[in-house]
Amino acid sequence: MKHAFLALALWAGSTLASAQVGDKAELDVVRWYNTPPISAEQMLGHGVMVEVFRTW
Amino acid sequence: MVEAWLKRMKPTYPIAITRGAFERQINVPHFPYSAVIGPDGKIAFAGNAGMGEGALDEAMARSKKQPLWPKSLAKINKLMLGDSVKAYAELRKLVDGGKVAEEDRPHVETFVAYLEGQAQAALEEARGFRDKGFVFKALRRIEPYSNATPPFPATADGQALRKELEALPEYKKELSGGEAYLAAEALEGEKEYLEAFEGYKSVAKKFAGTRIAENARAQAERLRTDGLPGFAAACDGCRKGGRACDKHRKDVKL
């Protein structure tokens, strides 16, 4: 079970607009830091926990 | 900034920067914020951290029970989070030993490209430090890759850069000064501007005639002209002004 989901932290840009629960997630990653790039296809089939942070 | 955080926190989960589409999708009202994406690729939850446990449990129940990367790469993936050189050595063992299963090959190639890219990026960053007169930083950045066994494609250039740095007339002073400079830089990062100023000033005097001394002098001068020495993080006036207020300001001299 340990590997059943992917925990992903994102550093955010600007935010606005409305919540879209139920919509297809658009993870428009510009840069991966501590891992080779993970494709959307690779994530498909996995539960993904996302934490959103921001730099100041 | 992200790199510094990674070094300090050593997260065991992937970190990424996005263009912002996902954050707009889930309407992030504040940071930190969280979301769960289900195995179908759809957003299952968006809200405060800790509030999405039901959605996460549900996503977990439907999730594939295997890792993102092939089992043959599990150890390398773990090593990659802390030690690229060891990870690359393991990876080369796997590749050169002809032990890569056909279905794992694209993932292995991704790992090779990623690790070799990291070494190349370190080399370029180290060259940038050298050009700006930060010998200590340049050496620290390239050292692991220039010593790597088996070598990365960037290792030979890394070794050449090390030799070039070691041949500098004030090499030892540049290193000692660089270490002291980093200590001052860390103090500045903690908003201890007065102590940082003194640290930079000390480097400028003690290592006079070196590139690091020039850099330290410039930093001390910047802190002074920005009115930062004496800044008190607990003072509203200092925080609002982004500089030491009249009450806390210390008149420092270089």
Image (cartoon, rainbow, N blue to C red):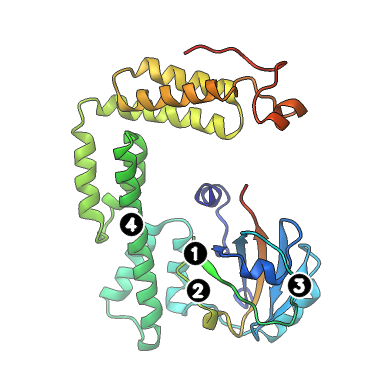
Q: How would you rate the neighbour count of disc 2 (Cα within 10 Å): few for under 14, some for 14-19, many for 20 or more?
A: some
Chain letter, disc 1 residue: A
The numbered mark at residue B119 is 4
Chain letter, disc 4 residue: B
The alpha-carbon separation of the residues under discs 2 and 4 comes to 20 Å
- Would you name the residue on which mark 1 appears? A32
Chain-order first, disc 2 or disc 3: 3
Between residue B78 and residue B226, name the one nearer to us: B226
Marks 1 and 2: in contact by CB < 8 Å? yes
Question: Of the residues tagged 2 and 3, which is closer to the observer?
Answer: 3
Q: Give the residue at x 42% y 68%.
A: B76
Q: Does label 4 lie on the same chain as label 2?
A: no
Extreme residue toward the front, this view: A17
Residue A43 spot, x, y in % from top left: 57, 79
Marks 3 and 4: in contact by CB < 8 Å? no
Marks 1 and 3: in contact by CB < 8 Å? no
Instruction: Indicate the secondary structure of the residue bearing disc 2.
Output: loop
Is residue B235 visible in the rendered image? The answer is no
The numbered mark at residue A19 is 3
Chain letter, disc 3 residue: A
- Taking B15 as reference, is B197 above or below it? above
Q: Give the residue at x 64% y 82%.
A: B41
- Would you name the residue on which mark 2 appears? A38
Residue B49 spot, x, y in % from top left: 76, 62
Marks 3 and 2: in contact by CB < 8 Å? no
Amino acid type shown at disc 4? Ala
